[in-house]
Image (cartoon, helix red, strand yellow):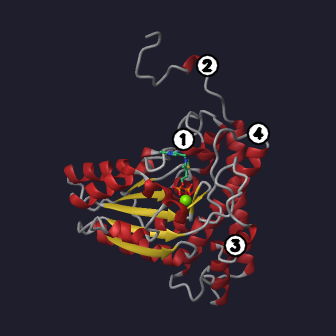
Amino acid sequence: MIAPPPSGPVPYAEELALGLLADMLRVRRLEEKSAELYGAGKIRGFLHLYVGEEAVAAGAIRALEPQDNVVATYREHAHALLRGMPMGAIMAEMYGKQEGCSRGRGGSMHLFDASTRLYGGNAIVGGGLPLAAGLALADRLRQRAGRVTACFFGEGAVAEGAFHESMNLAALWRLPVLFCCENNLYAMGTALERSESQTDLCVKAAAFGVHAIKADGMDVVAVHEAAARGRAQVAAGDRPCFIEFLTYRFRAHSMFDPELYRDKAEVAQWKTRGPIHTYSARLKAQGMLTEERFLEIERAAQEEVAQAVAFAEAGTWEPVADLARDLHTPEGQ
Ligand SMILES: Cc1ncc(C[n+]2csc(CCOP(=O)(O)OP(=O)(O)O)c2C)c(N)n1
Ligand SMILES: [Mg+2]
């Protein structure tokens, strides 16, 4: 049984309330355009979209501070964008152009930007967790108090040894990590209950002695509240915190997925809980949003996407002579 759509008043002043809406719309329009460009052969390689899950990155990233680190997965366009990476640098990276954030060498799964403390984009399931523990350990050793590392990962990662090792060390050494589990119920075509004996992920996390919280990942307000609470606990130096955001992806796992493992009716039911339309309806009901304002925010997002595409189109390919650049071994050895 799927819970009813998120409802009730939004407890924020206008700037944050509408900022969260703008964040989700920017992500949605970026993702939809990316799918279109993939179909047109402009973006190649792997592409995993975040459509349906926007409330998680939007709510959680707004709860972070500029000094915090962020580690994400291959489904990370939203995290990069909302952390402050220009949309043009994301699009150019997906095009493989050298104006991209990783000079076109990483593509969709390897967005990286040290200036906004976005430490990837990781193609390996669970690969970000040890990196997050390591970043937090570095902060501990360098005595950089007040910095938290937020690590986003799918529920598929809880089946990996790296999850258990990272949770254990983070808890044992009281490292400042905010573990943000994006539980969209499927790891590619494998439903959680087909791969895990314990499907309550907070029970698993609590076994390590960390704070463990559940939040409705389709409700940007619930996400923001939980992330703010979790971040505060972590920053206080108490213990790491694990948050399970229950969410759902509306599109296929990647561009190569025929989606044979779930019914169309299930997807349709989850769409009734869509994070953008339910949130907009709440804002409208309390008089914080008019249709005109909504369209204005949407137009701005579309304009940003159009500019990002123009930037990527105008971008340049890395010259072949540069191919050996950044290799650790001298050419010919
Ligand atoms: C170590 C490892 N094993 C397998 C894969 C292949 N793989 C790519 S995505 C994926 C599913 C991961 O699902 P989840 O963690 O729930 O994230 P979601 O895609 O749902 O966001 C798998 C098994 C991989 N990338 N890395
Ligand atoms: Mg998943």
Residue denoted by label 3: 271
Q: Which of marks 3 and 2 is in front?
A: 3
Residue 14 seen in the current view: yes
Badge nearest the viewer, 4 or 1: 4
| Residue type at the position of mark 4 | Gly
Q: What residue type is labelled 3?
A: Lys
Image-quadrant location for residue 194: bottom right
Residues at marks 4 and 3, CA–CA distance in whole angstroms: 28 Å
- The residue positioned 47% from the left and 67% from the top of the image is 60
For residue 41, which numbered disc appears in the image? 4
**Which element is circle 2 on?**
helix
Q: Circle 4 sits in a helix, a strand or a loop, which is it?
A: loop
Is the C terminus in the top left, top right, bottom left or bottom right quadrant?
top left
Give the farthest residue toward the right.
40
Q: Is mark 3 on a helix, strand or loop?
A: helix
Residue occupied by mark 1: 101
Counting residues from the N terminus, which is met first, the one under dot 4 or under dot 2? Answer: 4
Amino acid carrying label 2: it is Val
